[in-house]
Image (spheres, helix red, strand yellow):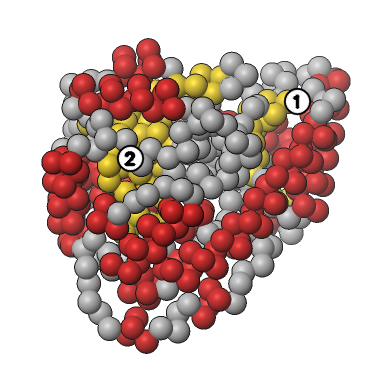
Amino acid sequence: MFSRRIEWDVRMNRLSQALEARRRAGEPVLDLTESNPTHAGFEYPAEIVRGFADPAMLRYEPSPRGARAAREAVAADYARRGVRVEPERILLTASTSEAYAYLFKLLADPGDDVLVPRPSYPLFEFLANLECIGARQYPLMYHGGWTIDFEALEGAVGDRTRAVVVVNPNNPTGSYVKRREAQALARMCAERGMALIADEVFADYAWVPDSERAATLIGMDECLTFSMSGLSKIAGLPQMKLGWIVVSGPEALRRLAIEKLEWIADTYLSVSTPVQCAAARLLEAGGKVREQIRERTAANLAAARALLADSPAGILAAEGGWYIVVQAPRIVSEEEWALELLTRHGVLVQPGYFYDFETEAYLVISLLPAPAIFGEGMRRVRECLTVRAGRGF
């Protein structure tokens, strides 16, 4: 009766079962997986609420590309980062997830595929399935830093591959695409008639400057390129449901892509009028939340490094974002580490296989929790790893 697109395995894994049992028993949990900034104790400016006092939001005048004033606000926010974007190249969506859906509709027919990075956030397969296309993985390599495995990437390209997805910086590795990598990606996509999709939601959260980094793929005109972001991360406002696509590339292709994206967006008209009216105020006020997130993630990163400095675990090199990847001793599986941390120490972390890490043993930890929670949680992580490693089993 139901579509095969949603034939997903929804059974709870062992970690989810253990978490539910602990919460059902009323036992506390130090959640080091928290990724929702509205749950992390940040102070949200009152201007955010006042931004919805505009009477213009009571008038419905839909525009498939998004209201001009809202697109101008997005363009102005890019200017804050020194990136010039014309409002005509911006199309608003309700989220980056919806932006992916629009782009997959635009670029691929049922049975086609897109290439996505591994490790990365476990969403691509679901989004691709819903559009009846495949998500084929290409690996990121780690040798003291993360790089794209171009040999494997080119080997993964098939006759029906329509786009390459990069996450810049990646979640959870925190690695940025380098300039030379971006140029190589653009050449490859141009030669093979593919598009380049860049998810840049964490681009504002670099920890250290790097002249070799591609801070954004906007303005890459060698191939058709789509750069995405939204309020969820850059302003810490996931509940406001506003994302966008910036289109770059050869002029004729770019204009045609924008025209077809408008057709798709006109079918749904999903971006609400109130959030479009409030966009400029939300972006401005959200900057204060962004600064709090930067301070929090930097402080928690320093605390994690100090706590694990002389432990049997290590933190993989990362450049930005909201997460760290901890490499644990391979004496047990990462799932066993996560289960022991939860059941014996009351700390929730995510095992690396949730993000398609190919080898053991990695634990993914968010830098968003309040410092008291994060510090105590990491102290328990250190204790667990040290004691278990000392026993050797």
Disc 1 element: loop
- Taking the image as shown, residue 88 lies to the left or right of residue 273, namely left
Q: Position of residue 204 (x, y in %)?
A: 53, 47
Q: In front: 173, or 180?
A: 180
In the image, residue 170 above or below residue 68: above
Indicate left or right for 72 with 50 as reference: left
Q: Is residue 7 visible?
A: no
Q: Answer few, some or many: residues within 10 Å of disc 2's Cα (few below 14, many 20 plus, some between 14 and 19).
A: some
Q: Position of residue 14 (x, y in %)?
A: 59, 38
Question: Dot 1 corresponds to which residue?
Answer: 313
Residue 386: % across, % down: 84, 27
Residue 356 circle label: none
The residue at 59%/77% (across/down) is 46
Q: Quadrant of the C terminus?
A: top right
User: Mark 2 = which residue?
Assistant: 219
Note whether 2 is above or below 242 in the view shown: above
In this picture, is 37 found above or below 309? below
How far is disc 1 from disc 2 in space, using C-alphas? 40 Å
Point 46% across, 30% down: residue: 177
Residue 158 shown left or right of residue 355 in the figure: left
The three-letter code of the residue at mark 1 reads Ala
- N-term-proximal mark, 1 vs 2: 2
Hey, what amino acid is under mark 2? Answer: Gly
Q: Secondary structure at mark 2?
A: loop
